Structure formats: C-alpha cells, structure tokens
Amino acid sequence: MRRYMDNQDEFHIIQRICEGETNLFSLFLSRYSDAVYSLIVRIASSKEDAEELTQDVFIKAFKKLNTFQGKSSFLTWLYRIAYNTAISATRKTRQDFSYIDETMIDKVPDENVDMLFEKDENENLLNKLQVVLKRLSAEEKMLIALYYSKGEKIHDIAGIMDLSSDNVKIKLYRVRKKLYFLIKKND
C-alpha cells in the first residue's frame, strides 16, 4: 500500500472496515495516532491524560466510522473527535487559565503583535510562549495547535471546532493579541 492515502483511499478502506475487515483500522491508528496525540497533549493536563484521551478518540472513531461521509479527510474528521473529546475532558477538570479583560486586548496595537511574532527562531520568544500557552483556555490552545502547529486551513478548523471561518479568523486574531499581552505582562 502507498505511504500516502488520499480521501478516496481512506473512504474505500473505511467502507471495507464497515463491511467487516476491522483489522484495517490499524492502518489509521498507526498513521494518525501521533498526530492526534500531539494535538491533545497541548491541552490535556498531563501526558498520561493525553494518551488516554487519544485512545478514547480512536475508540469513538471506530464506533462512529459508519458516519464518516468523506466530506473532509479522515484526519480532519479525527481532529473533530479529538477536539470534542479534549474539550469535554477539560470541562470535567478544573483548568486554570488566564482571564483578561477584553478591553485590554483591544488596546494592543496590531503592529506590536506582528513584530513580536515575526521573529523566527527566537528561542527567548519560544520559551515565553511555552509559559503563557499554559494560561490559555482549552479552546484557545486547540485553535493555536491546529493553525500553527498542524497547519490546518481556516475552513478545516471551522469544521473541526464547529465555528464559521470568519469566527476562526477572529478568534485567531484575538488569541494572538492575548498571547502578546500575556508575554508582555510576564516580562
């Protein structure tokens, strides 16, 4: 089998799994478990929780496989399940994230945010980001992970998070300002 599967290949394999060839699901597990884990670990409270949630995602995906319609890639569909699973789990545990008055975020000039995040390979910035990312809400962390780490398109993020594309753009804009504010506050 080819290393890369397109949507048609995935859909064909899913049909075969639904027809009883359940062992084929291991293809998806081996291919996508690292991607799902790396997304969930960004918002889970521990690596152990992320591992458990990743298992939950694949169990849910297997059980709901017959509902996959092929309108997106299988990975995007998995990310949707991962997002819902991770958000549900964080609601059950007390997450400590920073609330910032929206008027403070609005006062941050766009140019300042752009200048801060334009600096490639800035180790100091990366260290500061690691600290402040922990203070974001689960939804904000997921948004950042999908867009910046996973390189998902706005349209796909909208589908994963059940938002409009415009809403995703607005949330990304605001979370960048929030990150800037938190970094400057910690300086």
Image: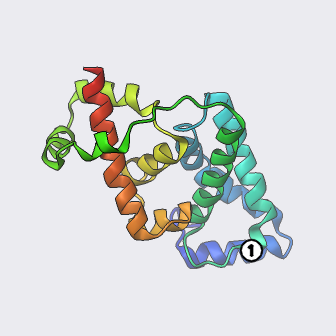
Q: Is residue 43 left or right of residue 173?
A: right
Going by the numbered disc 1, the residue's amino acid type is: Thr
In the image, residue 138 lies at what x, y percent?
Answer: 54, 42
**Residue that appears at 38% across and 29% down:** 132
The answer to whether residue 98 is above or below residue 155 is: above
Q: How many marks?
A: 1
Relative side of 17 to 10, left or right: right
Give x and y (percent) for residue 9: 60, 75
Give the residue at x 67% y 58%.
27
Mark 1, other Cα within 10 Å: few <14 / some 14–19 / many ≥20: few
Residue visible at 31% across and 44% down? 103
Which residue in the structure is indicated by mark 1?
Answer: 67
Element marked by disc 1: helix
Q: Nearer the viewer, residue 60 or 106?
A: 106
Residue 91: percent from the left, percent from the top? 67, 41
What residue is drawn where x is 56% and y is 65%? 162
Residue 166 lies, in percent from the top left, at 38, 68
Q: Quadrant of residue 54?
A: top right
In the rendered view, tell whether residue 137 sits above or below residue 28: above
Quadrant for the C terminus in the image: top left
Quarter assignment of residue 167? bottom left
Farthest-out residue, top: 187
The N terminus sits in image quarter: bottom right
